[in-house]
């Protein structure tokens, strides 16, 4: 691996900057997005309702219910990795801001425009075109914070609820430049502080009067608690696990031969897997208490259980990326790489497709395997097709323009600019 001593199997430096690309991360991202989509398809097909309170429901929610956590761990890892490789130097803020804006906003704004056009043409009852304030809040990726003071705000205008995640990622982008250098110096302390932030935030939400002032008959305390639980501080541990994981990944490969690292990763793997499965079971057990879309957020109100679940997931991912190539193959291959390339558009599109099919198509929702097959056969290809168009016509051209601008800036800036 460039910049980390001897190149290991599965490690590729595609950037030419010494920053490693960890191919298994593409696989994690691909499986995570597939998990999110499958969970929502299972809901549309009626399987979540049909399996509520059963072993099958525990299995589904245990495996898929908090898989969004993996996205935040991956984000922390890949965004902090360059800081680790550059020995604590974050890099130019303007360059980071342009790159992150180009990655996040164009495809997201396109999805908002698509939803607004659909609502103008044929809104699913009882939805209608949102007001200018709601549109402005979504354009600024502020929908989750805004819901704390205006609970009636519909995420994704009532059509594309999963865009709640964009607020969390956007918030992380804003925070990372402020903490990157200090975090590099004290990555274990940073992880401990992030754990404290996550547990402290959830305790504040659940055991104080934080949300009482916002509670109304239309929006009871429990609903506001679930909104608050999923704000950025509630995910601090997940991002920190990825960041500390990036630091550990680089340091381990600098200090030990690859063969030694692989053997030790194989020793850790069974324990990480057992912990992950056990904690997934505890998370999925929430399905015995409640059914519906709120199940995932409700399970995250268990502070210790979800924190340990995130740690076990990060440990399992670490064992895989540090393990031998045969262990990484299910995650580092052409198929998962292709899905990962289109994962963002896939994520942004699938709920739109599901919402409109529920409203205007008579697809089966009886909880049968046939219903699941029908929904999957429509939602997954349609969402991937949208993702392909979004990536080809919007995401890639804008990124190329940003990269070309960066290249010109480096040429004008000379050696000092290139070293910065």
Image (cartoon, rainbow, N blue to C red):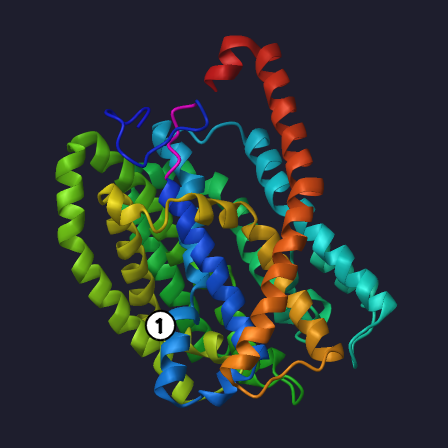
Residue interval drawn in magenta:
17-22
* Nearer to us in this view, 105 or 271: 271
Residue at the image point whose x is 49% and y is 39% from the top: 177
Most common SS among magenta residues: loop
Residue 321 picture quarter: top left
Side of 31 where 138 appears, left or right: right
* Nearer to us in this view, 161 or 197: 161
Give the class, few, some or many, for how many residues have Cα within 10 Å of label 1's Cα (few <14, many ≥20).
some
Residue 323 picture quarter: top left
Whether residue 21 is in magenta: the answer is: yes
Residue 175, given in percent of the width and then of the height, sits at 50, 46
Quadrant of the image containing the N terminus: top left
Examine the rendering and report whether any part of residue 382 can be seen. yes
When the figure is inspected, residue 84 is found, relative to residue 224, above or below; the finding is: above
Whether residue 220 is in magenta: the answer is: no
Residue at the image point whose x is 57% and y is 51% from the top: 344
Residue 293, given in percent of the width and then of the height, sits at 54, 79
Residue at the image point whose x is 13% and y is 44% from the top: 263
Residue at the image point whose x is 69% and y is 78% from the top: 358
Residue 49, given in percent of the width and then of the height, sits at 51, 87
Residue that label 1 marks: 303
Examine the rendering and report whether any part of residue 211 can be seen. no
Tag count: 1
């Amino acid at each position: 691996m460039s910049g980390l001593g001897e190149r290991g199997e599965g490690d590729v430096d595609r950037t030419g900057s010494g920053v490693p690309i960890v191919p298994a991360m593409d696989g994690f991202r691909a499986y995570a997005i597939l998990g999110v989509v499958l969970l929502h398809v299972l809901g549309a097909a009626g399987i979540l309702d049909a399996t509520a309170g059963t072993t099958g429901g525990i299995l589904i929610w245990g495996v898929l219910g908090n898989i969004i956590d993996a996205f935040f761990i991956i984000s922390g890892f890949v965004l902090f990795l360059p800081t680790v490789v550059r020995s604590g130097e974050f890099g130019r803020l303007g360059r980071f801001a342009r790159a992150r804006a180009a990655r996040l906003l164009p495809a997201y704004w396109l999805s908002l425009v698509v939803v607004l056009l659909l609502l103008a043409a044929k809104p699913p009852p009882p939805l209608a075109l949102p007001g200018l304030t709601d549109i402005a809040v979504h354009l600024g990726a502020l929908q989750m914070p805004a819901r704390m003071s205006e609970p009636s705000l519909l995420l994704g205008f009532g059509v594309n609820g999963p865009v709640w995640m964009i607020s969390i990622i956007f918030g992380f982008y804003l925070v990372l430049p402020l903490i990157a250098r200090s975090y590099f110096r004290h990555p274990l302390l940073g992880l401990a502080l992030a754990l404290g932030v996550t547990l402290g935030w959830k305790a504040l939400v659940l055991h104080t009067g934080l949300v009482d002032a916002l509670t109304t008959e239309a929006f009871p305390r429990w609903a506001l608690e679930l909104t608050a639980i999923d704000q950025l501080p509630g995910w601090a541990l997940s991002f920190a696990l990825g960041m500390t994981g990036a630091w550990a990944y680089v340091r381990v490969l600098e200090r030990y031969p690859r063969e030694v690292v692989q053997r030790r990763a194989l020793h850790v793997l069974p324990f990480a897997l057992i912990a992950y499965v056990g904690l997934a079971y505890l998370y999925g057990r929430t399905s015995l208490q409640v059914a519906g879309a709120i199940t995932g957020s409700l399970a995250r109100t268990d502070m210790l259980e979800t924190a340990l679940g995130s740690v076990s997931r990060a440990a399992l991912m670490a064992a895989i990326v540090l393990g031998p190539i045969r262990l990484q193959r299910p995650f580092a291959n052409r198929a998962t790489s292709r899905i990962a390339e289109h994962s963002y558009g896939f994520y942004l599109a699938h709920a739109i497709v599901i919402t409109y099919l529920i409203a205007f198509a008579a697809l089966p929702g009886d909880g049968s395997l046939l219903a699941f097959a029908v929904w999957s056969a429509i939602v997954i290809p349609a969402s991937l097709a949208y993702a392909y168009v979004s990536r080809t016509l919007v995401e890639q051209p804008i990124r190329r323009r940003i990269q070309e601008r960066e290249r010109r800036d480096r040429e004008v800036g000379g050696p000092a600019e290139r070293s910065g």
